[in-house]
Image: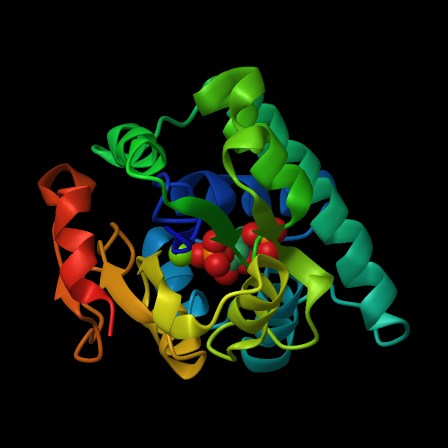
Amino acid sequence: MNRAIIFDVDGTLAETEETHRRAFNRAFKGAGLPWSWDQDLYRKLLAVTGGKERIRHFVEHYGAEGAPQQDLDGFIRTLHAEKTTAYTQMVNDGDIELRPGVEETIASAIRHGYRLAIATTTTPANLDALLEATLGDIGQGLFEVICAGDSVPNKKPAPDVYFKALEELDLPGSSCVAIEDSRNGLLSACAAGITTIVTPSIYTCDENFEEAALVIENLESLDVADLDMMFR
Ligand code: XBP
Ligand code: MG
């Protein structure tokens, strides 16, 4: 069977955004910045995908005190690198577990002959840490194709990362199903012609998922055999 399931990461494989938020705040504190993102603000900032892009949005739209006038790009890159270090440290310390049904869906999909891929906005080091911490040494190898972070010019909701995954899988969108948690992710996958299942996460549960083929609380209620009917 030449079909694939393409998984999003943050909010889909695991409820990672709360750890991302705490990692941002640790990086801000470490840099001596008077910034602190609480959950309400972070929910708003999540409208912008990509950690570096999110910091820039905060600087440009929230008048963040302490941001430099010169070389803002360099400042954001350094700050984001500190955030990634804090995030991977928290993941390595066991901060995160897979969402209900994710591990079973991965195992069942492989048994049913599906190829597996990942299409995420997050930085590759974050994904490496998450897969290692939750699936062990075999984690990476379960996914034939992994597209992450800055590997594409435009982040979700642009379709770039899904088009890249399709290219590397050498499959048309009609031979794939995507699993996402956010509206940005849903729009990205749909724009690449991929039927999409949404499992809303703690930061996205109020978003609009009208384009989704299926919206379920989590993957515990997905039977891989049901996927067959989803292929156009
Ligand atoms: C969600 C994102 C990411 C994370 C933070 O990724 O928008 O930017 O919030 O990760 P996904 P970085 O596509 O997996 O849902 O700081 O590494 O960008
Ligand atoms: Mg997500």
- Confirm whether residue 61 shows in the render: yes
Q: Is residue 45 above or below residue 51?
A: below
Residue located at (54% from left, 66% from top): 166
Give percent across and percent down for residue 218.
Answer: 17, 44
Give percent across and percent down for residue 28.
Answer: 65, 47
Foreground pick, 232 / 177: 232
- Confirm whether residue 93 shows in the render: no
Residue 90 occupies quadrant: top right
Q: Quadrant of the C terminus?
A: bottom left
Q: Is residue 63 left or right of residue 184?
A: right
Residue 138 occupies quadrant: top right
Foreground pick, 53 / 40: 53
Foreground pick, 199 / 74: 199
Residue located at (32% from left, 61% from top): 177
Give percent across and percent down for residue 226.
Answer: 12, 51
Give percent across and percent down for residue 136.
Answer: 52, 17
